[in-house]
Amino acid sequence: MKIRTKKAILLPEVLKIIIAVLSLVILIYLAVSLHGIFIQKSRIEQAKVNIDEIIIKLNDLKESESTKYTLLSPAGNVLTGWPYKPFFGDALYPNICGSNRWENCICICPIGESLGEQILKGTFTADNILESCNAEGICREVKGTNLIVSEKEGIEKYPIRVDYLKNEGKPLKISLKGGVYEIRPE
């Protein structure tokens, strides 16, 4: 029978512990990275499906008709209409809309927490939204003479927050009057 004495942890045992901890850290990192990839892909797919459905609704409208569409995803995004025409200077378009020479387009674009707060307070600028749409927005052409996309009454271009629609249980009201497409929360 061998008698063991507790003198110290041997070097091979320390190496095993270090390797085990490093392996766990690498596995956690990979899991978080994969989760991020799937979430991002899901957001893009949700945006594409929703914006395509909105375009179908717009194209099906006849003069003086309206319809509804429930937009619940992707969370943390806005629905915007372009061009944005400032008082001075040229009209602003996301890159994809301008490069395709679309006269009007709608986009679903992600917003961060700070931009979301700015939209809520009304202190955002079109450049902030444009930057977001250029980086990760999903855009489609809207054929027509004019386009109004606005969360607020009396304002032609004001981003519609998807989270607002979801939290308030409001569908989008999509209408065509006098050749002008209008998308607003109901």
Image (tube, rainbow, N blue to C red):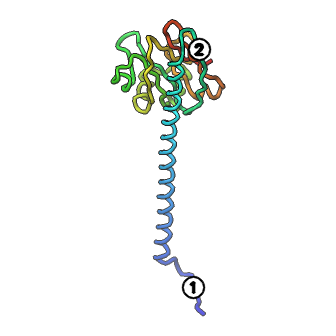
Relative to the observer, which residue lies in front, 29 or 101? Answer: 101
| 76 with respect to 133 (left or right) | right
Is label 1 in contact with label 2 (beta carbons under 8 Å)? no
Q: Which residue is drawn at 60% across and 18% down?
A: 67
Report x, y in % for residue 88: 37, 10
Report x, y in % for residue 130: 42, 24
Q: Which mark is residue 38?
A: none
In the rendered image, the vertical position of residue 9 relative to residue 29, given as above or below: below
Report x, y in % for residue 74: 54, 33
Q: Mark 1 points at which residue?
A: 5
Check disc 1 and give the amino acid type: Thr
| Badge 2 element | strand
Q: Mark 2 points at which residue?
A: 66
Report x, y in % for residue 68: 61, 20
Relative to the observer, which residue lies in front, 105 or 157? Answer: 105
Gap in angstroms between the C-alphas marked 1 and 2:
85 Å
In the rendered image, the vertical position of residue 5 relative to residue 44, given as above or below: below
Residues packed near mark 1 inside 10 Å, few (<14), some (14 to 19) or many (20 plus): few
Residue sitting farthest toward the bottom:
1
Check disc 2 and give the amino acid type: Ser
